[in-house]
Image (cartoon, rainbow, N blue to C red):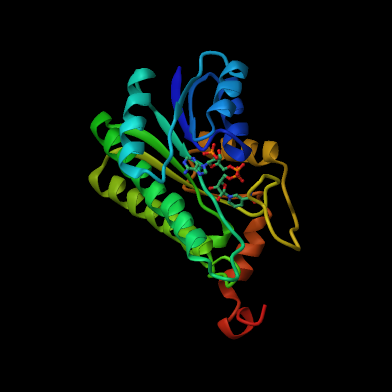
């Protein structure tokens, strides 16, 4: 059986994906900060492993990730779904910094440790949850959008590194639009996907070893629009 670790499995997309992976014969290791939710999920998913990991404490997070891998006697895939975001028009620094600590430092620490683990092993699969928000900056949530641009770019870097060094590491970047979880905040949300549907489409991207997937698929058209819209129009939206 393949072994998958999900960072940010306590709720939302990560939680649904944990259930789908388990139904598809993966041994699942689940991490996050909310231990009660982890314990509940472990009762639901037989043969699963849990670990409290706060990615904002990046050094400690790497140590705990290594412990979890050891407890599971290996890892074939990691899904980094942990993330936070704030609508922050006042540019409150505490919220900006928290976003950077979790979505940038925390993400990079886990992706970095996983890449090194898979390099030593000779194979592996890294799945990172970025966002459509990665495509353009946002005046309402500057740190969130910038942090997701970092995620997308970091994943591309790891993919290039794996390719150049000939190591069989697959890197999948997931770019969701809106998914109906605690993260989906703000006015005017549209095309909001149920987390179950999002997780199913992510699972398909995983099994297809895709480099990239929009979730849901129709967000490709919004992504295209965001890429082509000139700055002078974007700045008025
Ligand atoms: N929902 C959307 O519309 C949407 C759109 C685009 C991208 N995304 C991305 O999708 C990913 C999953 O979010 P979601 O929608 O499923 O929302 P969610 O239900 O709020 O899930 C976020 C997950 O991240 C974990 N997390 C947060 N801070 C953490 C920390 N310091 N250390 C470890 N884990 C941490 C949470 O666990 P704990 O709180 O237990 O630590 C939770 O399991 C995020 O990266 C988000 O940016 C979501």
Residue depicted at x 68% and y 55%: 185
Q: Position of residue 23 (x, y in %)?
A: 60, 21
In which quadrant will I find the C terminus? Answer: bottom right
**Considering depth in this image, is 113 or 34 the residue closer to the camera?**
34
**For the point 74% across and 59% down, which residue is it?**
189
In this rendering, the answer to whether 120 lies above or below 221 is above
Say which of 164 and 110 sits in front: 110
Counting every numbered tag in the picture gives 0
Where is 26 relative to 236, above or below?
above
Left or right placement of residue 224 versus residue 48 in this view:
right
Q: Classify the position of the N terminus by image quarter.
A: top left
- The image shows residue 3 at horizontal and vertical percentages of 43, 23
Counting from the top left corner in percent of width and height, residue 201 is at 63, 40
Q: Residue at x 69, y 36 (%)?
A: 196
View quadrant of ligand 1: top right
- Identity of the residue furthest to the top in this view: 47
As drawn, is 60 to the left or to the right of 87?
Answer: left
Camera-nearest residue between 132 and 110: 110
Residue 104 percent location from the top left of the image: 41, 54
Looking at the picture, does residue 206 appear above or below residue 49?
A: below
């Amino acid at each position: 059986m393949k072994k998958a670790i999900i960072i940010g499995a306590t709720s939302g997309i990560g939680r649904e994906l944990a259930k789908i992976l388990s139904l598809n014969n993966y041994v699942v290791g689940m991490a996050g900060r909310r231990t009660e939710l982890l314990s509940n999920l472990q009762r639901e998913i037989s043969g699963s492993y849990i670990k409290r990991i706060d990615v904002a404490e990046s050094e400690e997070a790497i140590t705990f990730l290594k412990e979890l891998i050891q407890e599971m006697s290996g890892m074939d895939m990691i899904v980094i779904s942990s993330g936070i975001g704030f609508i922050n028009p006042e540019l409150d620094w505490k919220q900006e910094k928290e976003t950077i600590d979790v979505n940038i430092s925390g993400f990079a620490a886990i992706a970095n440790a996983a890449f090194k683990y898979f390099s030593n092993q000779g194979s592996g699969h890294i799945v990172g949850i970025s966002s459509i928000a990665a495509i353009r900056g946002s005046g309402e949530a500057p740190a969130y959008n910038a942090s997701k641009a970092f995620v997308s770019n970091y994943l591309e870097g790891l993919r290039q590194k794996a390719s150049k060094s000939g190591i069989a590491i697959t890197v999948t970047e997931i770019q969701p639009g809106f998914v109906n979880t605690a993260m989906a905040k703000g006015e005017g949300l549209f095309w909001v996907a149920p987390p179950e549907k999002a997780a199913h489409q992510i699972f398909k991207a995983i099994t297809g070893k895709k480099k990239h997937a929009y979730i849901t698929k129709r967000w490709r058209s919004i992504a295209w629009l965001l890429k082509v819209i000139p700055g002078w129009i974007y700045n008025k939206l």
